[in-house]
Amino acid sequence: MKTRIILISLLFAGILLGLGCSTAVISPGTKTTAVYRMGELNSTVSSPIGTIYQASEEAMQELGLNIVQRAKDQLEAQVVARDAQDNKIRVQLISLTEDTTKMTIHVDSLAKARRIYQAILDNIPKAKA
């Protein structure tokens, strides 16, 4: 009897822990896909880091986010902003090759992550021009 109770308790604990680690795959109709897991949206974008950095800044301004920090070199870049509730939103960029950039969006909800991600992708053509 004790063994059953322990096994059932472990099963419920595993289920509860698994609920907090949701994963969502986002494919907004482009060549890129993104994965959201535990507060981070990760994607590899086929554009140089400078283009993605500029598109990230423009997207955050369009969304009404208050940019509080900017940092950029040829290998890494970061844009940090605050939303209306003073939640921190961070876009971190790492140059993988000259024409490929890894983008990580640190934000507390999937809905916000999708919106920011789509806004950045929409601003890439403007940033290239």
Image (spheres, rainbow, N blue to C red):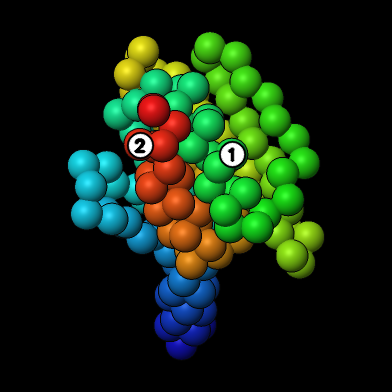
Mark 1, Cα crowd under 10 Å, few <14 / some 14-19 / many 20+, is: many
Nearest the eye: 129 or 120: 129
- Look at 56% across and 20% down and name the residue there: 76
Report the residue marked by disc 1: 57
Q: Quadrant of residue 58?
A: top right
Instruction: Provide residue 69's location: percent of width, then percent of height.
Output: 75, 35
Q: Can I make out residue 1 in this image? A: yes
Residue nearest the viewer, comparing 49 with 126: 126
Q: Amino acid at mark 1?
A: Glu
Instruction: Tell me the quarter of the picture where residue 39 sits.
Output: bottom right
SS for callout 1: helix
The dot on residue 89 is: none
User: Which quadrant does the C terminus fall into?
Assistant: top left
Of the two numbered discs 2 and 1 on the same chain, state the one appearing first in sequence.
Answer: 1
Real-space Cα separation, disc 2 to disc 1, in angstroms: 14 Å
Measured as percent of width and height from the top left, residue 88 is found at: 71, 52
Residue 11, image quadrant: bottom left
Image location of residue 110, percent across then percent down: 48, 63
Residue identifier under label 2: 125
Residue 103 seen in the current view: no
Q: Amino acid at mark 2?
A: Pro
Secondary-structure class at tag 2: helix
122 lies above or below 127: below
Give the residue displayed 62% in from the left and 49% down from the top.
Answer: 61
Mark in front: 2 vs 1: 2
Q: Residue at x 52, y 14 (%)?
A: 75
Q: Residue furthest front?
A: 129
Q: Is residue 53 above or below residue 33?
A: above
Say whether residue 16 is left or right of residue 84.
left
In front of the other: 64 or 32: 64
